[in-house]
Amino acid sequence: MMQEERLQKIISQAGIASRRAAEKMILEGRVRVDGQVVRELGTKVDPAAHTILVDGKKIAGEEQHVYLLLNKPKGYLSTAKDDRGRRTVLDLLPEVRERVYPVGRLDNNTEGLLLITNDGALMNGLLHPRFEVEKTYHAGVTGKLTEEKLQMLRDGLLLEDGMTAPAKVSLLPECEPGERARGLTRAAITIHEGRNRQVRRMFAAVGCDVKSLKRVRFAGLTLKGVARGQHRALTEEEVSSLYRLAGCTR
């Protein structure tokens, strides 16, 4: 039985681009079906029965979806490929044969929880601002974190790209090994936005410098049982929960 879908939806679900970006790719003539350039957005295709190329690369039909939780160490880029040959998070997943992508990004010097998948619909939903998917970080910072500064972070701050949404912020009593000796204060901060280097810039705005940063929670998932540099597959229940958070249907 033919299972036809709109071409832009197939591209999005393959994790290559958002639905809107996929539409732009089609209009620009970057998509071929069975060797022919397709520029019409309403085109429906069965990915299992036709060869679809985006920028000359084949989209696999009936590729099994992969859902992984990775505890990213420092020194790895949150991208599928780096033109300069630097290490990426996919170097930590040599056994994964599917074409997968990180959901969002963690800075090179930021560690912690990172989702990896080839489910484009879920990825786009989790990253969409409308659903306000929460992520929690533990930060080791220099500079005194007074109650006034904590409240400023909670209320929202004016950064160069606009006001941040209100955040949940609290001090942590414990320190990671070596942090106390370095005179760092440890804090937990929960946000739902995804601006570039947002947590670091928020602390900088109140006069604190982030020296260590780790994402410990994302979309209800935690790092429990996953050592630094290791990963695990998500359970069916966890994937279903992510779909609900992302406003998607399976």
Image (cartoon, grey):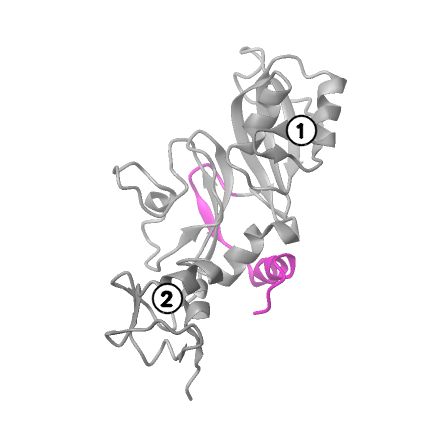
Residue type at mark 1 is Leu
Q: Where does the image place residue 138, in percent across and percent down from the top left?
A: 60, 30
Residue type at mark 2 is Ile
- At x 35%, y 60%, the residue is 98
Among the 4 quarters of the image, the one containing residue 42: bottom left
- At x 74%, y 31%, the residue is 155
Question: What numbered label is drawn on residue 26?
Answer: 2
Magenta stretch: residue 225 in it?
A: no
- Res 175 visible: no
In the image, 26 versus 75, the foreground residue is 26
Mark earlier in primary sequence (2, 1): 2
Magenta stretch: residue 246 in it?
A: yes
Secondary structure of the residue carrying numbered label 2 = helix
Q: Where does the image place residue 44, in percent across and percent down from the top left?
A: 42, 79
Above or below 250: residue 152: above
In the image, 89 versus 178, the foreground residue is 89
- At x 38%, y 31%, the residue is 75
**From which residue to which does the magenta span run?**
226-250
Q: Where does the image place residue 4, in percent across and percent down from the top left?
A: 43, 81
Above or below 108: residue 236: below
Q: CA distance from mark 2 to mark 1?
A: 39 Å
Above or below 158: residue 143: above
In the image, 97 versus 219, the foreground residue is 219
Q: Are marks 2 and 1 in contact (CB under 8 Å)?
A: no
Among the 4 quarters of the image, the one containing residue 137: top right
